[in-house]
Amino acid sequence: MKKKAFQAALPHTIPIAVGFLFLGMSYGFLMRSKGFSVWYPMFMSLFIFAGSMEFVTVNLLLSAFQPVYGFLLALMVNARHLFYGISMLDQYKNVGWKKFYLIYGMCDESFTVNCSVTPPPEVDRGWFMFFVTLLNQVYWVGGATLGALLGYVIRFESKGIEFVMTALFVVMFLNQWEESKDHRFALTGLGCSLFCLLVFGSGGFILPAMILIILCFTLSKKKDEREKQGEP
């Protein structure tokens, strides 16, 4: 049963492996360029396992100790997982102890596969989702660790490598823009971010922008619900 589930899950994760290995290596290189040993990217990718937040954490570790700021930033950056989790409640029923790892290891890519792919009838869905999640985490941890190890032996000008994080968000934004016909939310996010950037400056606009975005989305949702009910 486990072997069949692994064989069914593996092909769906190969494209993800390519992206995770290269992006993870960039993260490992970035950590080494900032003076961290290989243990930092390896264990951070293993226990945090949130790519965008791991890139953000690099600067958090190098700046003044601000636990509240770090907590709120992590909550805002990964707030989308709240909605992922709610939508997967039915999927994770009756999978036993695997549920705890599936909740912990869920990332954008694992969510996409587990939510959209139906395994063959002879394959247990719980084990299928487990191996999808496990393989994706292995790719990410392996890429981050490999990048950090190569950082010991490959010397190059690392200035600007932190731009990988910016590129990651740009690619995610463009993918969502192409997949969605309604661009109101994307434009709302851009508008709120630009407004907060002008008001608070580049050093402190992220949290206000995310709070403002959530507020705008909440008001927009309530407005849509009233329109559906025929209220003014």
Image (cartoon, rainbow, N blue to C red):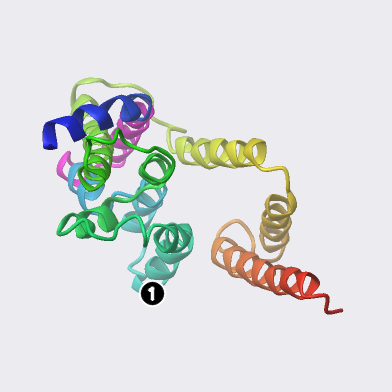
Residue 114's spot in the image, x, y percent? Answer: 36, 43
User: Which image quadrant for residue 99?
Assistant: bottom left
Q: Nearer the viewer, residue 170 or 185?
A: 185
Numbered disc total? 1
Position of residue 72 in the picture relative to residue 65 (left or right): right
Residue displayed at 49% across by 38% down = 168
> Does 188 appear in magenta?
no
> Does 30 appear in magenta?
yes
Residue 184's place in the image compared with 209, above or below, is above
Instruction: Kindly state the secondary structure of the residue where label 1 is placed.
Output: helix
Position of residue 101 in the picture relative to residue 204 (left or right): left
Residue 217's spot in the image, x, y percent? Answer: 66, 66
**Which amino acid type is marked by label 1?**
Val
Position of residue 211 in the picture relative to residue 79 (left or right): right
Q: Nearer the viewer, residue 164 or 218?
A: 218
Residue 28's place in the image compared with 57, above or below, is above
- Specify the quadrant that holds the C terminus: bottom right
* Part of the protein shown in magenta: 19-40
Residue highlighted by disc 1: 68
- Specify the quadrant that holds the N terminus: top left
Residue 132's spot in the image, x, y percent? Answer: 27, 38
User: Which image quadrant for residue 97?
Assistant: bottom left
Residue displayed at 53% across by 42% down = 169
Residue displayed at 49% across by 36% down = 163
Label 1: how many Cα within 10 Å (few below 14, some 14–19, many 20+): few
Residue 112's spot in the image, x, y percent? Answer: 43, 42
Q: Looking at the image, which residue sits at the far bottom?
A: 231
Q: Main secondary structure of the magenta part?
A: helix
Q: Nearer the viewer, residue 15 or 168?
A: 15
Residue 101's place in the image compared with 111, above or below, is below
